[in-house]
């Protein structure tokens, strides 16, 4: 999971974030990649790509998300209504960072870009101290869910460890994904340039 840089989508500056999963067992391999473009001003999703390859199943899906028009479009399908300040699967982890959920608190928001998959629920589970390649961090563990498949599905048992400081770094993520358990740990942090209008 990484921020690739800042691109332009339909004339708007957008963070390009990528999430890749490569792994599996003999005779069943997973090679998934999710790319998201997030408006630097509003933090709304503008585009989301899914390249899924799990065993014999594969698909490529492009979502153009147009918050200014209140619509999203899947591949060449007709546009459909979306929500205000929409989030997609890839931008979701960054939204969890900014939500500021505390232990014992539950937040419920209607920001997932497919309206009937809302609400997005964020629950502060506990405090924890974890050591990963990037260092040792005091964290808050958040349980996020969306009514959809993928890493934040209701059945995925996802937990995100966020540093308990102003940076709210995603230090660790654990979930069940495509029949497997998945654990991601922060390996390094490199601060880039600040986006400007």
Image (cartoon, rainbow, N blue to C red):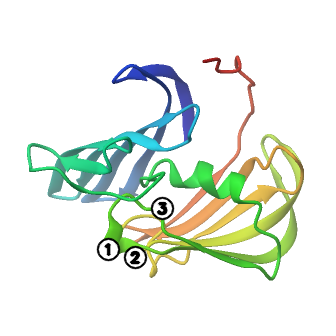
Q: Report the mark closest to the observer, 2 or 3.
A: 3
Q: Residue at x 43, y 49 (%)?
A: 21
Q: Earlier in the sequence, mark 3 or mark 1?
A: 3
Categorize mark 3 by other alpha carbons within 10 Å: few (<14), some (14-19), many (20+).
many
In the displayed structure, does residue 134 sit left or right of residue 8? right
Residue 148 visible in rendering: no
Q: Residue at x 70, y 59 (%)?
A: 99
Categorize mark 2 by other alpha carbons within 10 Å: few (<14), some (14-19), many (20+).
some
In the displayed structure, does residue 168 sit left or right of residue 179? right
Mark 2, secondary structure of its residue:
loop
Categorize mark 1 by other alpha carbons within 10 Å: few (<14), some (14-19), many (20+).
few
Structural distance between the alpha carbons of marks 1 and 2: 8 Å
Quadrant into which the N terminus falls: top right
Q: Earlier in the sequence, mark 2 or mark 3?
A: 3
Residue 104's place in the image compared with 64, above or below, is: below
Q: Which residue is mark 2?
A: 147
Q: Residue at x 61, y 48 (%)?
A: 94
- Image location of residue 14, percent across then percent down: 49, 28
Quadrant into which the C terminus falls: top right
- Asked if labels 2 and 1 touch by Cβ distance under 8 angstroms, the answer is yes
Structural distance between the alpha carbons of marks 2 and 3: 12 Å
Q: Which residue is mark 1?
A: 116
Query: Residue 1, which numbered label?
Result: none
Residue 101's quadrant in the figure? bottom right
Q: How many marks?
A: 3
Query: Residue 111, which numbered label?
Result: 3
Q: Report the mark closest to the observer, 1 or 2.
A: 1
Structural distance between the alpha carbons of marks 3 and 1: 11 Å
- Image location of residue 148, percent across then percent down: 36, 71
């Amino acid at each position: 999971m990484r921020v690739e840089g800042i691109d332009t989508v339909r004339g708007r500056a957008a963070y390009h974030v990528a999430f890749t999963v490569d792994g599996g067992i003999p005779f069943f391999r997973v090679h998934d990649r999710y790319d998201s473009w997030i408006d630097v001003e509003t933090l709304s999703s503008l585009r989301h790509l899914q390249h899924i390859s799990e065993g014999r199943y594969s698909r490529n899906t492009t979502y153009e998300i147009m918050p200014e028009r209140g619509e999203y479009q899947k591949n060449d399908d007709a546009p459909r209504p979306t929500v205000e300040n929409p989030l997609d699967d890839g931008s979701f982890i960054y939204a969890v960072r900014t939500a500021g959920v505390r232990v014992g608190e539950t937040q419920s928001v209607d920001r997932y870009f497919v309206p009937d998959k809302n609400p997005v629920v964020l629950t502060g589970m506990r405090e924890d101290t974890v050591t990963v390649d990037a260092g040792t961090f005091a964290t808050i563990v958040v349980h996020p869910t969306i009514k959809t498949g993928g890493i934040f599905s209701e059945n995925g048992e996802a937990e995100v460890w966020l540093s308990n400081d102003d940076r709210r770094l995603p230090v660790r993520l654990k979930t069940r994904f495509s029949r497997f358990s998945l654990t991601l740990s922060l390996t390094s942090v490199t601060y880039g340039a600040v986006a400007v209008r």
